[in-house]
Image (cartoon, helix red, strand yellow):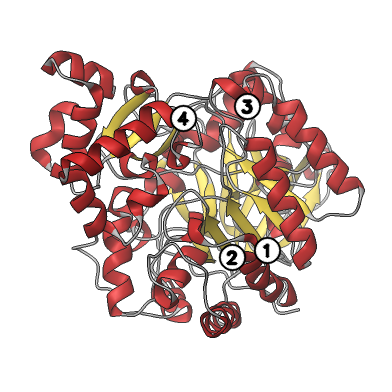
Amino acid sequence: MEDLVIRDADVVDGSGADAYRADVVIDAGRIVSIVKEAAAAGCQRPRATREIDAEGLVLSPGFIDMHAHSDLALLRDPDHSAKAAQGVTLEVLGQDGLSYAPVDDRTLEEVRRAITGWNGYGDDIDFDWRSVGGYLDRLDRGIAVNAAYLIPQGTVRALVVGWEDRAATPEELDRMRRLVAEGLEQGAVGLSSGLTYTPGMYARDAELAELCRVVGSYGGYYCPHHRSYGAGALEAYAEMVALAREAGCPLHLAHATMNFGVNRGRAPELLALLDRALDAGADITLDTYPYTPGCTTLAALLPSWASEGGPEEVLARLTDPATAARIRHDLEITGSDGCHGVPVEWETIEISGVGAPALGEFVGRTVRESADLRGEAPWDTARRLLVRDRLGTTILQHVGHEENVRAIMRHRAHTGGSDGILRGSKPHPRAYGTFPRYLGHYVRELGVLTLEECVARLTSRPAARLRLPDRGLVREGYRADLVLFDPRTVAAGATFAEPRRLPTGIPYVLVDGRFVIEDGRRTDALPGRSVRRTPL
């Protein structure tokens, strides 16, 4: 007797091929047999200790979130329903060049402060690791879903160079290369950058290329949040394509959007750029979330010169009237590089979360709305929030365009990523709704993608980028990371008004053959582990 048989499922196997009816048998965490059209053929049907009647349900591989910010949430919250309930069975952490390994004591404290808006400060976490391998070992104690890790280039630079805007010395570059190699040897799948975030943004292309050469030699990939998604976005994409080609490193473009008014309707230009590179032999993939607003921290909008030196230096500049006036000019007139070269439009900046409870009145309002209520300039409101919340404020940035979202998700290099920040009282609904929104809104309601196409973009294509030999497809011998969903009802419950509502139409999710969602409810299982780079 096997562990489980899922009977009469409509299998969408992740390859992009048409669905088929089958019984799927699972034992010891793997798919052991697939019996197609078992009922119609009248053959002996497989037996197991448990059976699930999947009539009317689609069985697919578990979804892979190619851009997740659950680095501390997986340790803090064993339930992790935000992702498990969506059918996510694997997340890729260490994004945007900032995370918690490799570090020393000084750098860990600096990084915790710098990305409090993403993950919280972590008072409830025992930071008992310093290396990439140590962090992955910590995940292996048991988490809700599986997780892979990208070495964060900004963290590496903070550890070796600090938070200063200067070129690395040859000795420092050698040490950074060694740290990247060590992280890859310990199981990281690649390298990420946040090139509008300090200190990673201070690295020039030659430095990044040297690190990417190391990544490519280990079979990893480079995942940049590049230098602009606004003014100069196309040039920023082209820069990353050229850098990865020079370094001989596969490229995965993070949250590949075209935002702000300057880029309305310009997605075809981006896709043409990528197609030329792909046709010339480049190895490129990308991820997007199926929403128009972005999400980051309020501090991320500041110009790079104002962010040099780390969080305490930033706060000191904000409290100095003359320096604050210079920051305001860059934000509102010149166009800060932190705001992608576009002058900030305060009516598009909605406060989604604060660290200080006393600032809760600002959440759910734009900076301009709060400023109007207080009878002050928007900059004065933003500055007050930055200082009183010690840079921990998160925002939604309503600057996207639906036509760009749809065009990019149709591209042959596309995969899905939530970019979900789970912190804050009104987080972006993409943290809770990305994958069911793809299936419900963009497949069933709009027909932008077929079901088979969409599932492939959420499963086998990201698994191929991660070089996972036994995930991303419904195949005999593959790991039983699986989702059963109702294609007629699957939908994102999360909205901008109620961003933590769980999805509908996903009654079963298995990680390594164990139910993490059963009959639509979270179990207490913690079968997830780190997924480490497959050696060349």
Of the residues tagged 4 and 2, which is closer to the observer? 2
**If you read the primary sequence from the N terminus, does the residue marked by circle 3 or circle 2 appear first?**
2
Q: Residue at x 47, y 72 (%)?
A: 156
First in sequence: mark 4 or mark 3? 3
Using a 10 Å C-alpha cutoff, classify the residue at mark 2 as few (fewer than 14 neighbours), some (14 to 19) or many (20 or more). Answer: many
Residue that extends furthest to the left in the rendered view of this protein: 358
Gap between marks 4 and 3, in whole Å? 23 Å
- Asked if marks 2 and 1 touch (Cβ < 8 Å), the reply is yes
Q: Hey, what amino acid is under mark 3?
A: Val
| x then y, percent, for residue 525 | 39, 60
* Residue at mark 3: 405
**Residue positioned 33% across, 55% down in the render:** 115
Mark 3 to mark 1 CA distance (whole Å) = 24 Å
Q: Calculate the distance from the C-alpha at mark 3 to the C-alpha at mark 2.
A: 25 Å
Circle number at residue 191 = 2
Task: Give coordinates of residue 519: x percent, y percent.
Answer: 44, 41
